[in-house]
Image: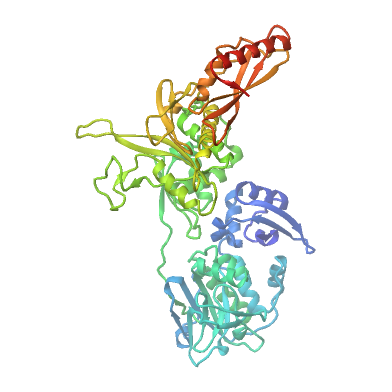
Amino acid sequence: MKFSYNWLQEYFDKKLPEVQKLAEKVGLHAFELEGVEKLESGDFLIEWDVLPNRSSDCFSYDGIASEVSAILDIPRKYDIFNLDGKEYGKELKTSDFVSLLIQEKNLINRATKRLAVDVKVKPSPDWLKEKLESIGQKSINNVVDITNYVMWVTGQPVHAFDFDKLDGKKKNINIRFAKKGEKVIDLSGAEHELDEKMLVLADDKKAMDIAGVKGGEITGIDENTTKIVMSAVNFNFENIRNTAKRLKLQTDASKRYENEVPLCRIDDALALMSYLFETECGAKISNEILDTNKEFKKNKSVRVTLDKINSVLGVDLEEDEVMKIFNRLNFKTEAESGIFIVTSPIQRLDLNIEEDFIEEVGRIYGYTNIPETPIEEGFIIPQKNIVKDSINFVSDVLVSDGFFEVYSRTLVDSGVVKLKNSLNARATTLRKNLLDLLKEKVEKNLVYSDEPKLFEIGKVFEGYENSDESKVVNEYFSFAGIIGKRKIKEKQKEELFYRTKGYLEKIFEVLSVKNIEWKKSNDKNFVADIYCADIMVGGVGINFWEINFEKLVENINESVDYKKVSKYPKIERDVAFWVPSKYTVKEAEEFIKNFLPEEAIKLSLFDIFKKDDEDKKSFAFSIIFQSYEKTLSDIFVNEIMDKIYKKLEENGFEIR
């Protein structure tokens, strides 16, 4: 928001610092400096970014003057026009000519009206024109210019209605919701169609203006105006914000209203407007003010302690230093033994709790004056959560392989651990596994995908750790996954199982679980059981698995064995042979390893092939040879391979 340097100076007897220093000083202690602009008149416009929390007091010259006074620690003038206690003729009563009705009282915090007669509309005096022109406002006439001036001084938008353009002998002003489709032509000539959520000020026949946003042309001031109804209202800020947004019409008035204007500003605005109408328009002012809320709440007192001020700010201020800062801010303060009872000016709506007042002390004291102190206590390194970290690793790996993570319900209709007070007849127990619900979900997803791949990691509840009255539920994180298939043909089962096994082996590698052993399962629901350090941790079916995740991560071994890289080349050979259908990969691996020398550094399966009409299958292994001492010859490797071929044939295996 832009403010005139010369206009600000009028609030101070003491000369203000030169414009750039003033702008930067306020920028350091209150509002970010946006820029300084020199005008042709020789004046300067200072633009500060006044944030919404300070709009209640600093969207006005009066508020900015108070802020400058506190920051520079220089006194300011408060009653420039000597309005305190000013009264007007009691023979003219506003209530004889005007009535005020509020239909939507929850949206009108306070409304006031005052009558002025014998008004002379004419060009504004030079001082008023200069003020408005300094902030980019065009002079209209003395009445309109006074309303704009009052808003900039006090922060309270005001309006002047031409009394004779209102309907009826006695003017009934009603603040109500607009009727559907009701239209208002504003002072600029633009027509706006309103809805039932927008407030208007209306007489008995028509809407006169868009409340809180813009005045209407129909009751506008012109050269024939002699009677004026002065209006100052405090609207609900949310309603005005919504109205301005829906109409795409933001004005100086709506900008102030939508950021909330203090109720007390109505008194300041009405007093100043009345005085200027009397002095600059020759008007007679009614001493009576129609007011819907004369007894509005004042700001509450807040307890602030010196210890907390110093603790929060990291300073060592004395009680008298804090008192001086509160006095500079014009706070009413009582202090005793490091405890302050502070009441802020009623226009400061942003001050509500102790921390708000501590912030005020900090910014007036100056953030640059707060010493930099090193942190004395050492940082505490949080304990590593191995289960949580492992869950994240597993999720990342499976998602990258095309799996989708699901979260199923914990309460189910059948399980071991029953609830004492179930809220749902179909959710009476805690789930004992993840696979049951996972299979249900994959069936539903098969409607949309040929092969939905799902997984879940979550708590399951298998039973109780003890049997006495203080039963403790045995719960742990389980890890389940499934590769969805509409129908699995017999010839597809083995390939699908090895795909499933491959996903899990990748998980084990990522987690650094090395002592894994696969054994044929005795459970009809699974093909293989997974053992880790001789403890069964889970089972694997043809296209699914479920594993006790906590037991798995207990066997994570993050230690790394480093080996010197051989400078000699590798030699790779393949061997493929037929085995009976029931023969396992592990059995084949163990058989070949019996005949491999230490130069064979890696043995890995890379293919399984099976004919539909034969009761046998083919395993294909890759063997990598490498020495750390010399370059191996083909003759050496071929001799090893010949030996392997011979042993395979001697044991009834057919070489492919």
Looking at the image, residue 181 lies above or below residue 491:
below
Instruction: Give percent across and percent down for residue 494.
Output: 52, 34
Viewer-proximal residue among 307 and 1: 1
Viewer-proximal residue among 282 and 587: 587
Viewer-proximal residue among 484 and 566: 484
For residue 573, what is the image quadrant? top right
* Left/right of residue 462 with respect to residue 379 in the rendered view: left
Instruction: Give percent across and percent down for residue 557.
Output: 50, 21
Instruction: Give percent across and percent down for residue 336.
Output: 39, 42
Q: Is residue 320 visible?
A: yes
Q: Is residue 393 visible?
A: no
For residue 131, what is the image quadrant? bottom right
Looking at the image, residue 369 lies above or below residue 152:
above
Instruction: Give percent across and percent down for residue 203.
Output: 51, 86
Q: Quadrant of the C terminus?
A: top right
Looking at the image, residue 170 lies above or below residue 472:
below
